[in-house]
Image: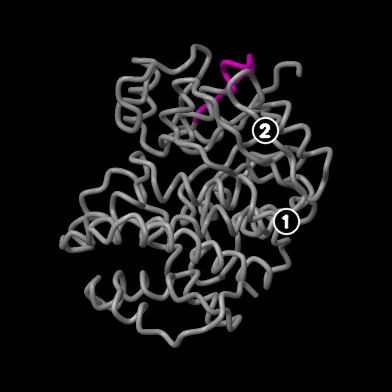
Amino acid sequence: MSARSVAVLGAGSWGSALADTLARNGHDVRLWARDPELAGAIASSGSNERYLPGLKLADGIRSTSDLEDALSDCEMVVSVCPSHAVRDVLETARPHLSGDELVISASKGIEVGTDLRMSEVIAAVLGEGAETRTVVLSGPSFAEELVRALPTAVVAAAADEGAAETVQGLFQNGYFRVYTQPDVAGVEVGGALKNVIALAAGVSDGLELGANARAALITRGLAEIVRLARRLGAAETTLAGLAGLGDLVLTCTGDLSRNRSVGKRIGSGEDPEVVLGEMEQVVEGVRTARAAYELGGRLDVEMPITASIYSILYDEIAPREALARLMAREPKPERWS
């Protein structure tokens, strides 16, 4: 693919990793950070020590805190802000967009209050035609490993096959493999809900419940994700792929998982408010637990693990009490529908 001008909105660990990949692929990359101090530090050091300490980013990334500057004459926009900030950032960006740009959504979450997936938020903000110009990028991918050029595989999902193939060509290289996928809803639900289940897996590990419990949480967590995704029109097979099972396993077991780490501290007895207050980066599963709990209730979808995490985070239920309630549920057949 010939060089493209790409604006990456969000200079956290994942935004920086995607900007690094794009720059290594020869594209003109502008990395926007809300914080001018962070943008300046990246520009002067060539690294993002706040979020990816000790890792050098590729040459050719131009960091800026000026949104208009980042978007000037760009052909593609990568939206990789925390999910709760996507609407605000895109509303600010909209006057600086021509309306022809391909938008790549790399944020994982469900918007609290609206129950919208990130591609739906993008469509709501950018208006007519945005849905066909939006591609969702998701899958099992720790930012640190991507910057270290370790083998990684993800999915580019879009209603428009040509748009997905364009994003595939934009990112793919010798260590970053991108598959295309038409099931946008399935990919987004998988990417969002895996963070909630990872919190649960972390709580289990903090309580020292063992490998059996972790395996059960991953498997039954996937059942919850499938139930919700199917109600939203997704295909069950999507959740057996990279954006479903793949991302779920990584986030529930990997030591680089923020959601698992936070859950582990909560399970070991630390106060959730204190733990979250000490986090430098956003823990997406916390807000998504609320959104998923509310969405599941509205759609009458059974999601007991999500409900348990919600009760720990928002109803101040002790982890062991939440576990006891989960295990005391009425016996039933194993079913996913």
Question: In the rendered structure, does residue 23 fall within the stretch colored magenta?
Answer: yes
User: 190 or 126, which is in the foreground?
Assistant: 190
User: 141 or 162, which is in the foreground?
Assistant: 141
Q: Can you identify the residue that label 1 sits on?
A: 127
**Which quadrant: the N terminus?**
top right
Q: Can you identify the residue that label 2 sits on?
A: 178
- Above/below status of 305 relative to 143: below
Percent x, y for residue 25? Answer: 63, 17
Q: Is residue 202 left or right of residue 176?
A: left
Query: Residue at the spot x=71%, y=30% of the render?
Result: 75
Within 10 angstroms of label 2, few (less than 14), some, or many (20 or more) residues? many
Query: Magenta residues, as a range?
Result: 22-31
Sequence-first disc among 1 and 2: 1
The disc labelled 1 sits on which kind of residue? Answer: Gly
Return the residue found at the far top. Answer: 59
Percent x, y for residue 233? Answer: 73, 67
Percent x, y for residue 81? Answer: 48, 45
